Amino acid sequence: MLRRGRPGIPRPPRARSRIAGLCLALLAALAIVALPALPASATPSFQMPFSCGETWLAGSRAAHSPDADSIDWNQSSDADAGKPVQAGIYGTVTVQPYQNPGYGNYVDVTVGSNWVVRYAHLASVLVGNGQTVFPNTQIGTVGTSGISPTANHLHYEQRFYNGSTWTVQPAVFNGVAADVGTTPPGEGNANVSANCGDSLPSTYNGDGYDDLSLLHQVGADGVHAYNLYGKDSPFASPSLARDMSTGGWAWSKMKLASGDFNGSGEDDVAILHQVSGDKAHAHVLYGNTSTPFSYNPTLAIDLTSKGWLWSEMKLASGDFNNSGQHDVAVVRKRTDGGATVEILYGSSGTPFGYATTLAKELPGTSGYDWTKMKLAGGNFNGDNYDDLAIVQERSDGGAGVYVLFGSSGTPFGTVTLVRELPSTDGWDWDKMKIAGGNFLGSGHGDLVIAHQRADLGADLHILIGDGSPFGNGTTAVQSLTNASGWTWTKMKLAAGDYNGGGWDDLIIVHQVGTDGAHVQLFTGGTSPFGGPSLARDMSTYTWSKMKTTYAGE
């Protein structure tokens, strides 16, 4: 199905993966399909080409063709035949001609203009030329093609182009060098796949770097949509992506969420716009590789007949059912003061066209209070389904952290209280701002809390995601003192992998001067946060007239 006015991109199936033993691979000619250029100095966010949590043995040898930095992956020799192979990266497919002897059935995935990932000896190929793939996309199955009767395994290469020559690089997964053993003897060293996260990039222009969108009030109540594009050193000058100063748009009547709602490979912005009677229309500003938001916003669904009140809705986004398109969770107020969680499902073509789904009731009689909820989305337990975190005020003024877990079918079947943050430990719900992101690069979503300090600055804390998220303590990562110029009330948060480092970064859009703004970047990593660094001076803009949006908000 084609999206209105834009080419449709087929969504491949997702799957799990495995591999096996020794390999004789001969150097082959390389055909490349170009994606938007990735700067040569940036290593893409590679993940192992297997499902989350699977253990595979990585081996190589000095005489490995075409290079000792190639990897042979296996688990149990011939038992690996037919096991799924995933892309482990976002990119574009080239299915290469069969080579015998040599690579056999092999696929290249092009990432920017400097990187190609090669997967060889496949028993079957499940993708097509020019297809966009995501980390969890199954590209084929393990085999012995081109090298029969050698044992089943996957031959794998991360190839880099320096401007004149393609070379195989030492493999890096999830930001860490692969543990590759010498074969023979043995079959290699064990590596555990962290290919666990959301398979969708958070990028409005499809270049693999996350971007930040700012909707800025202009005139009486019009809107300009600006994009700050991620790259090695984000962000360049703000780009006016859409002028919405006419056409009935009102900045004060907008609530935002961001995500790849139609599965095209570029993020979009969902705008829940207030209409007469405090009802709502859901519109979509579509991203694209050339000029994001250049198409007129599409009315995706009219919610006026449902009786929902715009002023009583809160939004978060994520791929809650692992369909390949982001969804929007609408948490709306119940008459008893609790909350009803509805889902607007993404889809190819025009998203949100299906009937809304009531996913979970959180009644006031059970202690839930819509007015005391703050939301964030993320894959907090690393199972490939995005989840919804609700941070609700406790009776003592602290906070309880609840997670509604994503799943196939109808997500959010259960709500789990995963963490208590009592006031006796210094927590104050009124002094919290939150954002979700994979800040440690672990493949699990984490929750950052910017908590107001006694001096009116902020302390940054991270609740770490894992199989049982947020239960392993709270990491205080940075203090932003008022004496250093930080004020909690002057902060707006966003999260994403803005510099291509393989983990999410934190953005604080901070009010400066009379009412200008500085975009400060705190880099993620195994010991977050690095920085801050001033990523963009927007002191000529108006901070109080900005609304930010990012995937997972």
Image (cartoon, helix red, strand yellow):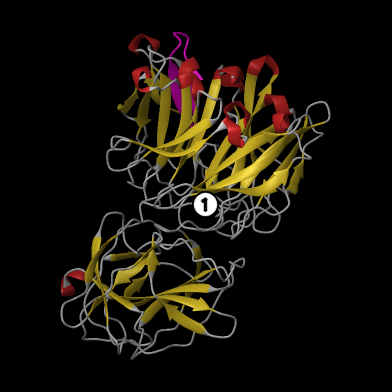
User: Looking at the picture, how far across and down is residue 144, in whole percent?
Assistant: 26, 80
Q: Is residue 341 magenta?
A: yes
Residue depicted at x 46% and y 77%: 159
Q: Which amino acid type is shown beneath numbered disc 1? A: Asp
Q: Is residue 249 above or below residue 35?
A: above
User: Looking at the picture, how far across and down is residue 400, in whole percent?
Assistant: 36, 23
Front residue of this view, candidates 350 and 117: 117
Front residue of this view, candidates 290 and 352: 290
511 relative position to 452: left or right: right
Location of residue 274 (image quadrant): top right
Residue depicted at x 48% and y 49%: 504
User: Looking at the picture, how far across and down is residue 278, in whole percent?
Assistant: 65, 16
The magenta-colored residue range is 328-343
From the image, tell me which residue sits under label 1: 497
Q: Is residue 327 visible?
A: yes
Front residue of this view, candidates 217 and 181: 181
Q: Is residue 354 above or below residue 83?
A: above
Q: Is residue 162 magenta?
A: no
Q: Badge 1: how crowded within 10 Å, few (<14), some, or many (20+)? A: many
Location of residue 120 (image quadrant): bottom left
